Amino acid sequence: MDIYKALKKEKKSIKRFYILMIILAILLPTTLWLTGIITKFYIIYVALLEILILLAILKKRDYTKLEFSYKNNKLKFTNGLFSQTHTILCDKIAIVHTEGIEDYMKIILVSSAKLRNRRMKLISKNFLDKYPQISEEYIKIKKISSDEKYYFQIIKKGGLKKYPFLNEIFKYCVKAEFTDDCIENIKIARGETLN
């Protein structure tokens, strides 16, 4: 399936989910009122279900939100419902790696500049052990500039919107090294079909 068709399908699916949850949120108190069985137990039970419905809607919105824009060599993105806007200098991104496919894909960015981004963490041995493909590229880059400090950020949320985001990273981060897994996902973002 083409990634843009998959994005449209995902958007319709999310819209159906929101509509179903809103109908359910309206229907539960209405049925309680129409039946006339208004006891303390049922009121607490319906209130608890309403809270769970609201939490489900917030969780779905948090998981699927990814907004991004590019301007003046800066890639700005918001990942999740309650997160701040993160800024990354495109010239400072050294390595781009992806892990997984479709909704469960993680984009890992390694940069030499932090630029007021609290989510960027200093690369540690545990991180390099966890991601061996990044470790290989990191060793190559460290040979060239050994005194430079590198930071990483992992983007987990966004659903299928991560594919256009990955395409933007590929377009604007020309100095970055892309791992083999990342290149496969870029091919999907550029129009090859999902298996």
Image (tube, grey):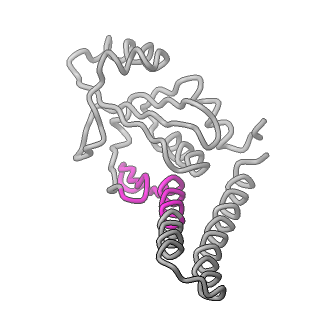
**Residue occupying image coordinates x 33% and y 50%:** 87
**Which quadrant is home to the C terminus?**
top right
Residue 182 among magenta residues = no
Q: What is the x, y in percent for residue 183?
A: 60, 30
Image vertical order of residue 121 relative to residue 60, above or below = above
**Residue occupying image coordinates x 42% and y 37%:** 154
Image vertical order of residue 126 relative to residue 18, above or below = above
Q: Residue 192: which quarter of the image?
A: top right
Image vertical order of residue 103 relative to residue 51, above or below = above
Front residue of 53 and 104: 53
Front residue of 34 and 195: 34
On the rendered structure, is 137 left or right of 26?
A: left
**Residue occupying image coordinates x 59% and y 31%:** 100
Front residue of 105 and 94: 105
Q: What is the x, y in percent for residue 117?
A: 27, 45
Q: Residue 155: which quarter of the image?
A: top left
Q: What is the x, y in percent for residue 119?
A: 30, 42
Q: What is the x, y in percent for residue 10?
A: 68, 57
- Magenta residues span 53-82
* Total numbered circles: 0
Residue 56 among magenta residues = yes
**Residue occupying image coordinates x 29% and y 20%:** 124
